Image (tube, helix red, strand yellow):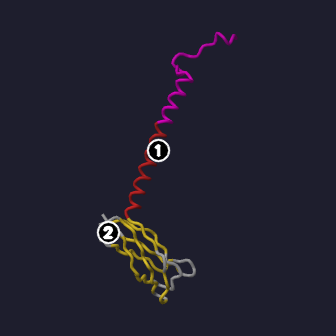
Amino acid sequence: MDQSTTTLPEGRYSRRTDQEADRRLRTAAIVCGVLFLGLVGWLGTSYLLRETAINGSVPTFQAVSDSELQLQLSVSKREGTAGVCTVRSQGEDGGVVGQYDFPVPAEGDRYSAVVTLRTTARGTTAQLLGCTPRG
């Protein structure tokens, strides 16, 4: 049988060329890429805007007793922005012994206070989990 005379059955195979298929695949990849970059940009911008609204730190802490930890909570924020800062303490075994959401008043662009975190056992850490503006 001569290969040059062999023809494909009518209607069984697509008439698209490889170039046309490559073009469609390239277009789909570009559209997906643009959508992905847009999503990353939107998420990044919303994260930065939320984080710059209120930022905190715990520069010092001291275990006062087996059930209390005193810590200094320092917060920088936009004027008029109230919020909440979550602080957690862990014991010697690494288990969480205390966690509390400390309110941050709206007045001023800075807030600093010595606060008490109640614990179920002696706390060995004071970790700021984050600060969230209150809408």
Q: Amino acid at mark 1?
A: Leu
Q: Element type at marker 2?
A: loop
In the rendered image, residue 2 lying in the magenta stretch gets the answer: yes
* Residue identified by numbered label 2: 82
* Quadrant including the N terminus: top right
Q: Which mark is residue 37?
A: 1
Q: Amino acid at mark 2?
A: Ala
Residue 36 at x, y percent in the picture: 47, 44
Count of picture labels: 2
Q: Element type at marker 1?
A: helix
In the rendered image, residue 127 lying in the magenta stretch gets the answer: no
Residue 29 at x, y percent in the picture: 51, 36
Residue 40 at x, y percent in the picture: 46, 49
* Quadrant including the C terminus: bottom left
Q: Residues within 10 Å of mark 1 (few under 14, many from 20)?
A: few
At a point 57% along the width and 24% down the height, the residue shown is 18
- Frontmost residue, 86 versus 105: 105
Q: 1 above or below 33? A: above
Q: Which residues are magenta?
A: 1-30
